[in-house]
């Protein structure tokens, strides 16, 4: 049986869309390959779930958290820059021993890197051992950055580059790119939501809940959603909830009006979407790679408000499954919320169309495609 070494790094965000994607890969491959998982945090959510899937403990990588910033990728603090070479050499030595222990070689193994930090490890290991590697591209990269040249050098040796959207495939523009959309489980027995024409007590709840699920980082643009909460026409009917943790928590808390709440990290996203949320917002000021939360919301018949750039705009259909708004435009976000409240029949149509659209991102199709790619290597 062929083997796959999964090189995950949860140090930056703890648990987010990237870690969900790695877990989906484990679930797609674990019956067909012998899988060995690694992570930089042995107590991470990814570590716990991967151990549950694989029935074995993960191997710990050494890492240092990347500092916050306004860019979606290549965002490295000075301490990270100083410590990264040391940790890379440490991890290479540790991983070479791991490969030997599991008898992994160029003839029976594949390396899987879902982040740039682990891509450095995969590229280095491949140069030493000849083992092929696959990179999962989940971030939009600045082609003018000096780091992009280094990225291209490492990707030239990749056997396949899994791109989570057409936006990412176009951004990288390399022959190994394979379009594999992120996927979502199809929800059963979901009915589109609606707002009574009275605009009161929407969906059996005294508030119309607009939620964001994101790490509290500057490039996520959450400050504009916070501002929008204070700009809606009927603030007494609207409750904005932001689920997540991160370095901007204190700053956002100071800005929150009475109808905006910071809820902390939520692991039960599907439960919240199904029971309490009427719209989601992804106000990122940088290009997203996919837009997992908007699509998960669509699967519950919930429309999304997203910025009009990157794959968040590719995945959300403007005025069909949600709304596109300009970046850094709190007024436009508030107008989108007001439009849903003021036009209940249009909101109902958005919900129905969102639910149908979500069927195009079925989890089973993604697993089949991932398995085909790895079996071909």
Image: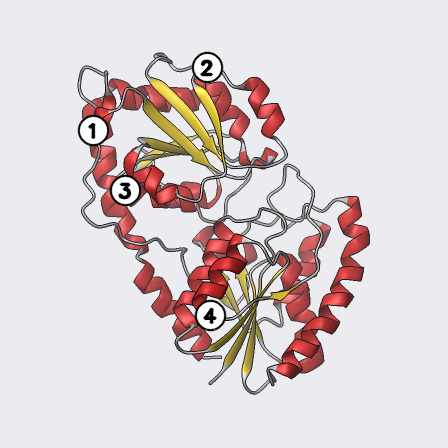
> Where's residue 363, x and y in %?
33, 59
Image point (51%, 58%), residue name: 48
Q: Is residue 239 above or below residue 68?
A: above
Mark 4 vs mark 1: in front = 4
User: Quick one: label 4 or label 3, which is nearer the N terminus?
Assistant: 4
Image point (73%, 52%), residue name: 146
Confirm whether residue 130 shows in the render: no
Disc 2 target residue: 258
Disc 1 target residue: 194
User: Quick one: label 1 or label 3, which is nearer the N terminus?
Assistant: 1
Label 4, label 3: how far apart the Cα atoms are: 29 Å
Q: Residues within 10 Å of mark 2 (few under 14, many from 20)?
A: few
**Quarter of the rendering containing residue 105:** bottom right
In the displayed structure image, the side of residue 96 where residue 240 appears, left or right? left
Disc 3 target residue: 300
Under tag 3, what secondary structure? loop
Disc 4 target residue: 54
């Amino acid at each position: 049986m062929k083997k796959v070494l999964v090189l995950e790094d949860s140090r930056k965000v703890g648990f987010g869309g990237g870690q969900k994607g790695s877990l989906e890969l484990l679930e797609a491959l674990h019956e067909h390959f012998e899988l060995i998982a690694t992570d930089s945090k042995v107590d991470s959510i990814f570590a716990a779930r991967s151990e549950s899937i694989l029935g074995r403990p993960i191997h710990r990588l050494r890492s240092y958290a990347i500092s916050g910033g306004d860019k979606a990728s290549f965002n490295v603090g000075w301490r990270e820059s100083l410590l990264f070479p040391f940790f890379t050499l440490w991890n290479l030595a540790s991983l070479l021993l791991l490969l030997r222990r599991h008898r992994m070689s160029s003839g029976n193994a594949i390396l899987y890197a879902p982040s740039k930090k682990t891509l450095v490890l995969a590229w280095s290991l491949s140069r030493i051992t000849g083992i092929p590697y696959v990179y999962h591209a989940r971030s939009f990269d600045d082609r003018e950055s000096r780091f992009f040249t280094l990225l291209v050098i490492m990707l030239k040796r990749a056997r396949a580059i899994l791109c989570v959207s057409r936006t990412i495939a176009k951004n990288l523009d390399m022959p190994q790119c394979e379009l594999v959309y992120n996927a979502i489980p199809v929800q059963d027995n979901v009915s589109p939501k609606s707002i009574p024409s009275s605009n009161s007590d929407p969906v059996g709840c005294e508030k119309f809940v607009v939620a964001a699920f994101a790490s509290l980082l500057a490039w996520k643009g959450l400050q504009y959603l916070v501002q929008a909460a204070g700009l809606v026409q009927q603030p007494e009917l609207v409750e904005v909830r932001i689920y997540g943790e991160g370095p901007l928590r204190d700053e956002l808390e100071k800005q929150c009006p009475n109808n905006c709440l910071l809820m902390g990290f939520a692991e039960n996203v599907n439960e919240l979407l199904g029971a309490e949320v009427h719209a989601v917002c992804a106000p990122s000021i940088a290009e997203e790679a996919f837009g997992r939360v908007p699509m998960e919301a669509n699967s519950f018949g919930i429309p999304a408000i997203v910025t009009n750039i990157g794959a968040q705009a590719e995945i959300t259909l403007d005025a069909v499954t949600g709304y596109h708004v300009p970046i850094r435009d709190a007024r436009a976000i508030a107008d989108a919320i007001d439009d849903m409240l003021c036009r209940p029949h249009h909101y109902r149509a958005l919900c129905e169309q969102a639910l149908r659209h979500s069927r195009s991102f079925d989890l089973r199709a993604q697993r089949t495609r991932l398995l085909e790619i790895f079996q071909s290597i």
